[in-house]
Image (cartoon, grey):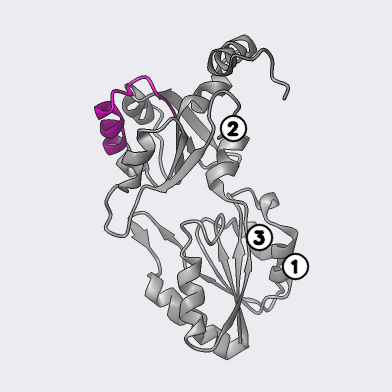
Amino acid sequence: MKLTLIGAGPGDPDLITLKGIKALKKAKVVLYDSLAHPSLLDYCPEDCVKILVGKRFGKTSCGQDDINELIVEKARQYGEVVRLKGGDSFIFGRGYEEIMFAAEYGIESEVIPGISSSYAVPALAGIPLTSRGVSESFWVITGTTKEHQLSKDLYLAAQSSATVVVLMGLHKLEEIVAMYSGLDKMDEPITIIQNGTLENQKLVTGKISNIVPLSKVSEMASPAIIVIGKVAALPDLSYDKVHEMMQKQTGVNGFAD
């Protein structure tokens, strides 16, 4: 018996890996998430059994315990089961939990990584998570811990100069703003990207001081990614402004290494 975890990528169906497509073409049964683009199921054979087990904030069609049981049930029934998960299954995708559960029943696993929305969505919105002279590192943090609290790691990240990417955190936006405000970072740039990589993508960019009203006026909704840090403002800056910023940060002239 075998479980194959496939990362579906950040949304755009063209961003799944070739190895993931090859696995879907041989699938007998697929348990797929809400964030996996539905057109990816077209790669599956006609007789493939397709089961939606998606979860969204505030809406759960299938709990994690139910998903674990389905993995075992379908692996026993068909000999193998494919688990299609949005983004990458090892980045806030609970893929490791599913592998460990399957292993208890003697089911071997294969992991096919996916492109993570944590870096792909900002990239396709024109935001580099790192940029010489602007940001040297980045944090990726969940906005929803298992206790439904804001991650304590965010407070540590907010004190640094790193870019901060918050996944599944739009419903915590006011708390995030309050945290940054308490650190006297009211002018820190911030961008919210909804439906990243898809045709209906939209974003709003502002500062910690005004992002809450801007997000309400723009009617931002989940699924969305939040990017906080100086790089969030780069798409709105001219070449000359970015060049000036880099000179101040590094003391070098020009972009070349």
**What residue sits right under mark 2 in the picture?**
128
The reply to whether the C-beta atoms of the residues labelled 1 and 2 are less than 8 Å apart is: no
User: Helix or strand or loop: what does disc 2 sit on?
Assistant: loop
Which residue sits at x=62%, y=13%?
243
**Which region is colored magenta?**
174-191
Residue at horizontal 59 percent and vertical 32 percent from the top:
128
With 138 as the anchor, is 8 left or right in this view?
right
- On the image, the x and y values in percent for residue 65 come to 38, 75
| Circle 3 residue | 40
Residue 103 location, x and y as percent? 51, 83
- The secondary structure type at the circle numbered 1 is helix
Q: Which of marks 1 and 2 is in front?
A: 2
Q: Tag 3: residue type? A: Leu
Where the N terminus falls, by quadrant?
A: bottom right
Residue type marked 1: Lys
Horizontal side, residue 183 vs residue 249: left or right: left
Q: Which of marks 2 and 3 is nearer the N terminus?
A: 3
Quadrant of the frame with the C terminus: top right
Residue at mark 1: 22
